[in-house]
Amino acid sequence: MNRPQNQVNKRDEKFADRTVTKIWDEEPDPENSYLARHCRCHGYDIIELAQKRSFVDVLFLLFQGELPNPAQARLLETLMIVLINPGPRHPATRAAMNASVSKTNSAHLLPIALSVLSGTHLGAEEVVAAMRFLQKRSEENPLKVATELLENPGPPEGDWHIAPGFGSRFGGIDPLPREAADLLIALPGHGKTLQWGDNFAEEIGQMNLGWLSTGLAAAVFCDLGFHRLAGAGLFQLLCAPGLLAHGLELADKPITDMPFLDEIHYVITKEAKKR
């Protein structure tokens, strides 16, 4: 018996003849057109930028299409320093460290860590959600928003993220984002989003909740005009140096240099057992 052949549907779309980008312009080398003789980022020659501008200036230019003013550059650079290392308590950093002592190829340490940092818990997805929250609610009175959200009780156990980018960490207010917020707000480049977030953090402080690093990053990205879709990748980019450094630190160490969870402390919840 003959089986009916699967019908192949042809695409009606007309594809572009070549790759098009407004970000980057390349002038072909006269002797080899596959190579670029000159490269321009949003119209600025990359070699000239390397001679006259800072990394933070060019990073801003790459995503925003224009160079930052001094206040914007200082605000972004300060955030970059604050976020440069999530620290060994962060799951993404632990992922890099565990992969390293497991003799993972060093080229894979950062991708492994960034995959963990992409998540909704203290990760890139939370930054996107926090930017959405701030853009939606920052025109309202922070006391009103806090009162509304506090009406719903938090979880019986563990940390409570009352809103994306705000909540508790290890049962308390994380002091580093709190201190960093004070530093950033003192800079002339900060805007209304960061100020609103700080007022909101003050209102929820009575419940032992406050800024998280994801919320702080989201507020600065909003004030600098970054789209929330860029927020995820920018957060990963700014945290990447610390993730890599911790992974490389253990590259030649034995697996015993990292703790191993014993059976007493390895707990599977009842809900997970039912799955």
Image (cartoon, rainbow, N blue to C red):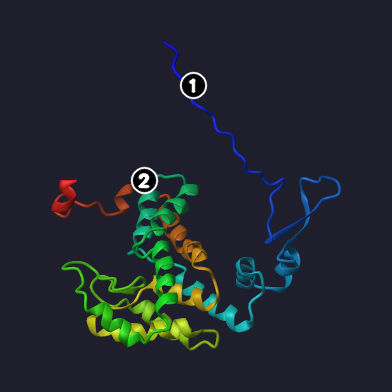
Asked if 261 appears above or below 236 in the picture, the reply is: above
Task: Say left or right for 63 vs 6.
Answer: right
257 horizontally vs 151: left or right: right
Report the side of 78 relative to 45 (left or right): left
Residue displayed at 32% across by 82% down: 145
Q: Secondary structure at mark 1?
A: loop
The front one of 5 and 27 is: 5
* Amino acid type, label 1: Gln
Residue 196 picture quarter: bottom left
Position above or below: 60 against 178: above
- Between the residue at mark 2 and the residue at mark 1, the CA separation in whole angstroms equals 49 Å
Residue pushed farthest top?
1
Residue at which label 1 appears: 5
Image quadrant occupied by the N terminus: top left
Query: What residue does disc 2 label?
Result: 102
Residue 267 can be seen, yes or no: no
Describe residue 102's horizontal placement relative to residue 78 as left or right. Answer: left
Residue at image location 24% in from the left, 85% down from the top? 206
Residue at left 47%, top 68%?
84
Q: Residue furthest right?
A: 30
Q: Nearer the viewer, residue 36 or 257?
A: 36
Q: As shown in the figure, which amino acid type bears the numbered disc 2? A: Ser
Residues 118 and 5: in front is 5
